[in-house]
Image: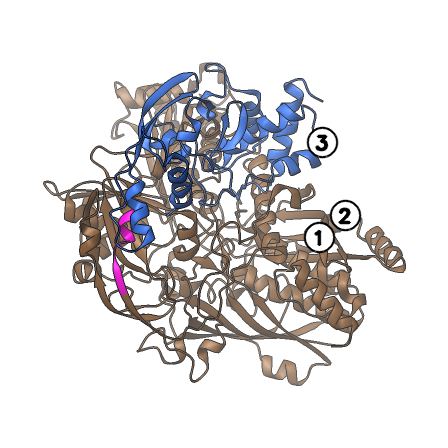
Chain colours: A brown, B blue
Amino acid sequence: MTTRIFGSGIRRREDPRLITGRASYTDDIKLPGMVHAAILRSPYAHATITSIDTSEAAGQPGVIAVYTGEDTDGVLNGLPCAWLIPNSDLKTPDHPAIAKDKVRYVGDAVAVVVAESRYQAEDALEFISVEYEPHDAVLNPKEATQDGAPQLHDDVPNNVAFTWAVAGGDAEAAFADADVTVSDTITLQRLIANPMEPRSAIAQWVSQTGDLTLWSTSQNPHIARFLTSVVTGVGEHKIRVIAPEVGGGFGSKIPFYADEAIAAFCSMQLGVPVKWTETRSENYLITTQGRDHIEEVEMAATSDGKITGLRTTVYAGLGAYLSTASPGVPTILHGLMYSGSYDIPNISGTVYGVFNNGTPVDAYRGAGRPEATMLIERLVDLMAAKLGMDAVEFRRMNLIPKFENGHDVATGLTYDSGDYHATLDICLNAADYSALREKQAKLREQGRYMGIGVSTYVEICGLGPSQVAGAVGFQGGLWESAIVRFHPTGKVNVMVGSSPHGQGEETTFAQIVAHEVGVDVDDVEIIHGDTDLTPMGWGTYGSRTTAVSGAAVTLATRKIKEKSKALAAHLLEAAAEDIEYEDGKFFVRGSPDQAKTIQDIALMANVAWDMPEGMEPGLEASAFYDPPNFTYPFGAHLAVVEVDPATGEIDLQKYYAVDDCGPQINPMIVEGQVHGGVVQGVGPALWEGVVYDDDGQLLTGTMLDYALPRADGFPDIHVQSNVTPSPHHPLGLKGVGEAGTIASTPTVYNAVMDALRPLGVTRIDMPFTPEKVWRAINSAQNGA
Amino acid sequence: MEGALACRFIVDKIAASDTLRLNGGAGHGRPDRQFTGRCNVKVPVEITINGKSYSGEVEARQLLVHFIREEVGLTGTKVGCDTSQCGSCTVKLDGAATKACTVLTVQASGSEVTTIEGLADGSDLHPLQEAFWNKHGLQCGFCTPGMIIAADELLRKNPSPSRSEIRHGLEGNICRCTGYQNIVLAVEDAARSMGGA
């Protein structure tokens, strides 16, 4: 029996199937009679469709059917947006699965071919003739709002989908009275999520029964079922969504896409299973991207270093249509986080959500919080420099002091618990900050440009209280549920509504059950990702699975324990209040030798030969956990870079991450989340970024052109942690999935700018490619 | 169309062969159309995969990764991109790590292929598989089969690599989850257990 399983870095039970190639991802599934769909996509970013002729394609070898928007019109409903933020004048233009009259980004679906094989389906796409009347396109989210810019949707003047504001305190007065102000314009370029598994869907419609089964690369199969019902009109009770093995998502597998709807449509037309799998290049065109912010920001402070105000105007590109959650990302998950880890009494921000002729933008790892942390941490560095203070000292003067049970910030949130000074101190000690500054000074004398970047962060996680979800316009709840079922042999199945896809909850949830009720961790199996097998849940994103779904598992297991105690009391002929529990055993106080094990209890409960009066048979419990508040993980990161002024190349030499996500169920998994998050956040600082040309053609259209982080770009990442439990969570957990990504972009950004400060460089747009850095150095040196 | 370049290559290569019947080329004045027709050519192949021989007729343009996944049904080998960047499809082709999206099935005819399913001896885990498990060298697992095969090649060429050599040796395989660090530790660990440094 394992007793200290909670907090132990045990190996993941997910891994044996994954390391041997036995796991089954959506595209690995082959159903009898299955046929293949390929989708014709608009080559124009903005055009009117004047004619489509599919007749020649229909006659190609293996082709079973060809459909266009004419066929889906009136059969499929438009793709819904599920986050209708209030008080924002939000416009929700129609988003047909297949475009009928107009295309609005390169990749917009125009027609679909269904054929016996995928090769045949793709071949036949070549034979569809589409005539377009192209229009001017606009990509820059600020330019898209200007008079005269190309208009994407007739009923959305100036392409402004919404205007949203956040305010706390009196920012106008703070800036009017400020001793010092700094300002900057920060561009957070579009990013491609790049889960290694491309998206895929198999739809199987059985007309005789009216059952629709959808295998889908989804982070949230229950939401996918709900939205499949909305779009296809099939009753929710007749839809089964299965997210089998899912190969990463990072937010891009949250939305409900046209492609799933099209696969369902094709299967419902043809009565055979239809598979669609995107190519990577197709993924780059159609699968939701992240960020796309232009942030005009300013900070006010007193001359002795106290931050007094923050103001922002943000243009957030949304792409051509609203994706499932897109309006909530640059607003609720962004603007409400403007205080960061600091006491900032006066905050005002305006966010314009803007349609542009690009791929729809939605949640991408961090979702709104990296965009907030970036602007705060950049302004903090700029302000420290302007005041002539060390960036760390300035942070220390403004960090929120330690709090254990609630701290209100000006944006209206109440952070749960935090010890921001502690994580910063641990980080600085690990890196030996003062020695680094000494080294930097020496190197500068030698004409070498080392930079030290620091960032703190706090993120809003554990989404979230359903009442708040409703208040901020999210068209769903944010609770999670779990069923814990003990079999007669004492083995356990746990069914959860969340849907992990790499985060390891099959292991950590088993650790929770083992911890709570003393079974062996290997006797617990976690079932997820199938709407027919699992209770309702809202999915895996926003670092919420362990925090919310894990709490449901905890509470359900505690119900098991309570029932077990009552049954043990009956079997031991004692009063329930005299029963003690220790390490999987129930016994009368003082008589541990006469214990009933949890396995004894499970057997008796299941055979039910000798139950107390009124007790139901079985040992099964379900729990629904609706969080009373969000959780607020936090931390401090530090990076050391050296820039070669002759080439503009950046060498990332050291990286220190100190994160506080509350107690850790499995520290090995926590570390892995931090490693991956850090690398994913360094990507946009140094290499990653979507590039469109003026016509809206995607220039970074393949993995050859879009620079993803590779193994050789990194030193070993030094990871440490601190533990500040959340006061409102049954296990104190906060969540860790996005921490690294939120912190590392500003950390490396600040490090590079710190390196370049003596050269007079004040601003470069990410990513910091050698060419951009070299040009910035040269123009600063030449006074240009 | 990912088969296009490969198709042009193979059509050129086999055009002279009278064992092949080119049934395309109906010609609609557009090169693509002529080209598509020719791609339907079926070619006999025989490939040994994980010690078992598979034979059949495949389209000349078919990529080896599609033969392995679709025809043979070994789906451990993954398709993560269409430009040979990601390395998810890495297999051993006659002993050498090869991205199976860069090879036509017909080119691999007569060759021996080892996929992730055949890497280990029987039901035991290969030391690299064991090390990836022990060191948490995977999260979603999609890149893992290709990563392990690539790491196997790395250790074959350099049984005692430094961390830096491991990082450089794996730069042809992309992982989006792990940040690579635990992969590096896993390969280092496997090197030790396989008798390297």
Specify few, some or many for label 1: CA neighbours under 10 Å numbering under 14, 14-19, or 20 or more: many
Q: Chain of mark 3?
A: B
- The answer to which of B20 and A288 lies nearer the viewer is B20
- Mark 1 and 2 residues: CB-CB less than 8 Å, in contact? yes
Give the image location of residue A499, x and y in percent. 39, 42
Task: Please tell me which residue is depicted at 28% across the width and 25% down the height of the picture.
Answer: A612
Q: Which residue is mark 1?
A: A638
Camera-side mark, 3 or 2 = 3
Which element type, helix, strand or loop, lies under badge 2? helix
Give the image location of residue A697, x and y in percent. 44, 64
Please say if A324 is above or below A657: below
Give the image location of residue A602, x and y in percent. 35, 22
Specify few, some or many for label 2: CA neighbours under 10 Å numbering under 14, 14-19, or 20 or more: many
Please say if A313 is above or below A471: below
Query: Is residue A217 a member of the stretch shown in magenta?
Result: no
What label sits on residue B162 in the rendered view? 3
Q: Chain of mark 2?
A: A
Q: CA separation, marks 3 and 1?
A: 25 Å
Q: Position of A30 compared to A105: left or right?
A: left
What label sits on residue A431 in the rendered view? 2
Magenta region: A122-130
Q: Amino acid at mark 1?
A: Leu
Specify few, some or many for label 3: CA neighbours under 10 Å numbering under 14, 14-19, or 20 or more: some
Which element type, helix, strand or loop, lies under badge 1? strand
- Mark 3 and 2 residues: CB-CB less than 8 Å, in contact? no
